[in-house]
Image: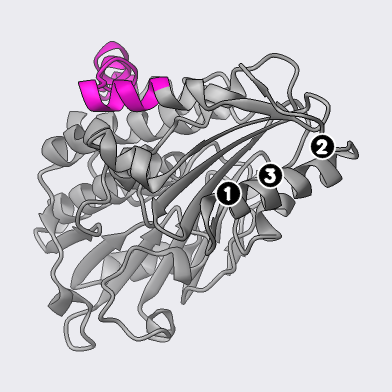
Amino acid sequence: MNRGADESRGHPPATLMNSLADARSLVCVGHVSPDADCLGSALALARAWSASNGRRASVHFEEKTVSARLDFMLDWAEVEPAVDADFADADADRIVVVDTSQPSRAGVPKTLPEDWHRSGTVLNIDHHFTNTCFGEVDWIVDDASSTSELVYLLLRAMGLPIDPVSASLLYAGMYTDTGGFSLPNTNAKALHTAADLVELGASPSDIAARLDRSLGPAQFDLLKLIYQNTRRAADGALAYSSISHTELTQMGCDASDIDEQVNVPRSVMGISIAALLTEVHPGRVRLNLRGEHDTQVAGLAQQFGGGGHRQAAGAILACPLNEAVERVVSAAAEMLGAQTCGTTQR
């Protein structure tokens, strides 16, 4: 295991590079409901590795889990999708899991056994400090801006090609995980990496337009409803919004359309915690958390069986939406040391 510190950030472990170099085939997977960083790091790694040696690389994302907003990344990458047989013992040479803190959150086929990650073929690349180090080789750098930044460093260290498409995929991953290079994880190293990716062919204006200014009518109406449903609690320190499964489907949307909308309650001035609760299926609620200033929310997510970064985390709650809202608001208020006050529509 290599849990990277500052001095090792630019140096992927030799065991990881050797495993990739010796692999006959590669399957890249990320977490369920993949975001741009998950997609960018998996797709770019598969492209570059395959281009360097002509061997087969594929990616696996569960059907209907990639948001319409991020479909362009799949179109750009043109990476072969994996099939269930690629994960079979006879065919699975190396499975690279990116941007995923624990095996239960990996978007692998449901046909795999629960202990699939113990096969001895799993390489784990991530920047979540809650990562459980479940791979044969683990490279976890929790102060990296994104997993896309780590994949860039890995490709550079291995001398693998980064063409304009791969550069664009990695830039998109970094752009979203840093909030458009505006969050505390935006440091000099991240900016230098982004500049290198632009030099390699990534177009900041095109990528920003696709990520920030490309909502379809249904997704725009969903965003309006999230604004409408936003409330404050915990003496104003918590802003949260919620979407029921009925509301989601009546909009013509599904769980894949929920991505960065937690930024709606996050935009309220003066808060410490922002939360978005989405009933992705009846009785199954996805919780997205963000911490403002120095507020850490990973511990709050862990109370509900989740995890993530110190200031960006999430969990899944198996209960009705109204119960999930009550539990999260109460736990957040207790964490903030404030009594839950009457909610106010904003």
Residue 304, located in which quarter of the rendered image? bottom right
The kind of residue tagged 2 is Thr
- The one nearer the camera, 50 or 269, is 269
Which residue in the protein does label 3 denote? 310
Would residue 35 appear left or right of 68 to someone viewing this image?
right
- 208 lies above or below 148: above
Give yes or no for contact between labels 1 and 2 (Cβ–Cβ under 8 Å).
no
* Residue extending furthest toward the top: 205
Dot 1: few (<14), some (14–19), or many (≥20) neighbours within 10 Å?
A: some
- The one nearer the camera, 342 or 129, is 342
Tag 2 or tag 1, which sits nearer the N-term? Answer: 1
Q: CA distance from mark 1 to mark 2?
A: 15 Å
Which residue in the protein does label 1 denote? 322
Residue 156 circle label? none
Main SS of residues in magenta: helix
Residue drawn where x is 33% and y is 63% of the image: 107
